Amino acid sequence: MSYKAITLKKRPETVISEDLFDVVELNQPDLLDGQVLVKLSHLSLDPAMRGWMSPDENSYIPPVKLGDVMRASGVGDIVESKNEQFPVGTRVMGLMGLTEYAVSDGSNLNIVPKEIPQEAILSVVALPGVTAYHGLFEVLKPQKGQTIAITAAAGSVGSLVGQMAKNLGLTVIGVAGTNEKCQWLTEELGFDHALNYKADDFQNQLTNASSNGIDLFFENTGGTAQAPIFNAMNAHGRIAVCGLIAEYNKTEASAGPSWVGIIKKRLNIQGFTMPDHFHKFPEYGKALGQMLMKGELKYRAHTLEGINSATSGINLLFSGENKGKLIVKL
Amino acid sequence: MSYKAITLKKRPETVISEDLFDVVELNQPDLLDGQVLVKLSHLSLDPAMRGWMSPDENSYIPPVKLGDVMRASGVGDIVESKNEQFPVGTRVMGLMGLTEYAVSDGSNLNIVPKEIPQEAILSVVALPGVTAYHGLFEVLKPQKGQTIAITAAAGSVGSLVGQMAKNLGLTVIGVAGTNEKCQWLTEELGFDHALNYKADDFQNQLTNASSNGIDLFFENTGGTAQAPIFNAMNAHGRIAVCGLIAEYNKTEASAGPSWVGIIKKRLNIQGFTMPDHFHKFPEYGKALGQMLMKGELKYRAHTLEGINSATSGINLLFSGENKGKLIVKL
């Protein structure tokens, strides 16, 4: 049996283009003892993939080797098994790559319940969910009554951060790049404020929305919104630096704010990436699954069809054109 | 009886000049019940005084009012007392201002032992010491074997941070602005490396000194040295932002480093100022006093004579011309 997969042909200079990838036909290898064959049904396209495509000695995870299947999360069902822990029919998620089938020894797989739709798994319980959960609870340590600002607030991570913060009793300010996304944040997700950073009067809108200042800042973008939010931080404010999607495709990243504000306001700034916290995934996943089942977390998936759609589809994340969690349905 | 004091006449625009101050003659008021009269013997000139001279809604402590005695730490002896806790002859330190005599109800005073010279009190146990202690132990959380970089390393705070870190088994890189200071750091204080940030090959010197990267960064200056040290940080590095003396006299503070490094290296950056941690002063003071008595902490005092010397002397901190803790002996 042969199947399709997407390999990394070239590394990006600035933007990601289709010609960086090859769509290849692979032959299914025979399973060794302990291995399983997963038939993927849904692949996840995430901003973190940009980092995995570029070699960087400081990065938290080795880059994908040229010619290897591109790294990505996915959900699928076990269709052949030589591993007792993963019988045929088990549904799993994990970093299985942009591929229709994956062979695994199980070490990169988590079993997930079939009651939760696969798109909800990838949107809420998988990487976006654990990232939102860790950044909010472990880094920002929110307290009822505080004000939180979130960039890329309509993105897969930001939308979950805002909903969890709202459920805790915080005032939630979301920043996004289209009016449609802002409307979704306030009308569907219950954010207190949603501001379009492309608006001419963004600074005024932010000043009005943050009349009590900003205590917590969940940073996903960099770019235009960073300085105004930074300048509105309250004393003892906390900043979680989760992503800087506006910076990744630049040849030279923008400077950050002066550190004078860091002293005057005694700010805490913490960068984080989830591979450091892999051991917490089961705990976070359980908590997120419970919130999802209780109806406390809404999501929307932006679904592409067929594995070939991944090579151009990933760019929707960087242009901001995706509406919700970007998923490829196979 | 009348005595001299220095009041704040004008607020600084950029640099501090003598004409911002008035030297005034004050008459000693009669003591009320609970009050004491302190005869100051030594006044402390500290970089924090720059912030106390300027109104800033974000500052951690209200600015000195125009016409009031300028805020400053000092050491003195009780010469009259209507307070049982502070009998005549007791030696005290505290924020008593730039003055020859101070009246106090005791709430701003700490009793200090007479066995420790007054200059050692102000250099090690007072504000510089508690700042160094808090920043190193509570913010940076050092571990044996790590490498720490310290700016303004020959200053009153930096020199103590480096000595305490060295005593814990860290590799210590000090950055200072003259070769004489660098020599003092390595030859007298036992720093592993001391680099002059004004040297043409500072970047190369830093690269050589930090061959294992930098785990901890105690930032006192901003300016030239900040970016090279930031770029040399290791993953999971910690940065304590204690002071930015190169920035305070500028009309517009310099930009900071891009936040991309904060994510890639999962850095933690914490600004701090000591008034937030006032309740820890007795604990820190005790620990510092013990280190001092054991000979684990060396210091050098740059001593000016007479209260009038304070108005021009404070500028030595900003030009970097002071050699050691700047003190006015009365």
Image (spheres, coloured by chain):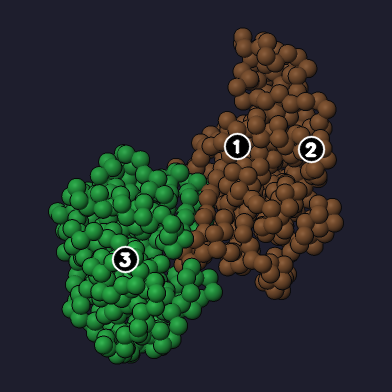
Chain colours: A brown, B green
- Residue positioned 82% across, 32% down in the render: A117
- Residue positioned 66% across, 12% down in the render: A83
Quarter of image, res A31: top right
Marks 1 and 2, the one that precedes in the sequence: 1
Dot in front, 2 or 3: 3
Look at mark 1 in the image and give the residue it sits on.
Answer: A8
The answer to whether residue B267 is above or below residue A225 is above
Percent position of residue B10, x then y:
41, 88
Tell me the element at label 3.
loop
Look at mark 3 in the image and give the residue it sits on.
Answer: B86
Q: Quadrant of the C terminus of chain A?
A: top right
Chain containing the residue with disc 3: B
Alpha carbons under labels 3 and 1: distance apart: 76 Å
Chain containing the residue with disc 1: A
Dot in front, 3 or 1: 3
Alpha carbons under labels 1 and 2: distance apart: 34 Å
Q: Amino acid at mark 1?
A: Leu
Q: Could you classify mark 3 by the number of other residues whose Cα lies within 10 Å: few (under 14), some (14-19), or many (20 or more)?
A: many
Q: Amino acid at mark 2?
A: Leu
Percent position of residue A178, x then y:
77, 61
Q: Is residue B54 left or right of residue A184?
A: left
Percent position of residue B264, x then y:
50, 47
Q: Which mark is residue A49?
A: none
Percent position of residue B70, x then y:
36, 80
Quarter of image, res B120: bottom left
Dot in front, 1 or 2: 2
Look at mark 2 in the image and give the residue it sits on.
Answer: A292
Residue sitting at the far left: B187
* Nearer to me, A51 or B43: B43
Q: Amino acid at mark 3?
A: Phe
Check if mark 3's residue and mark 1's residue have beta carbons within 8 Å.
no
Tell me the element at label 2.
helix
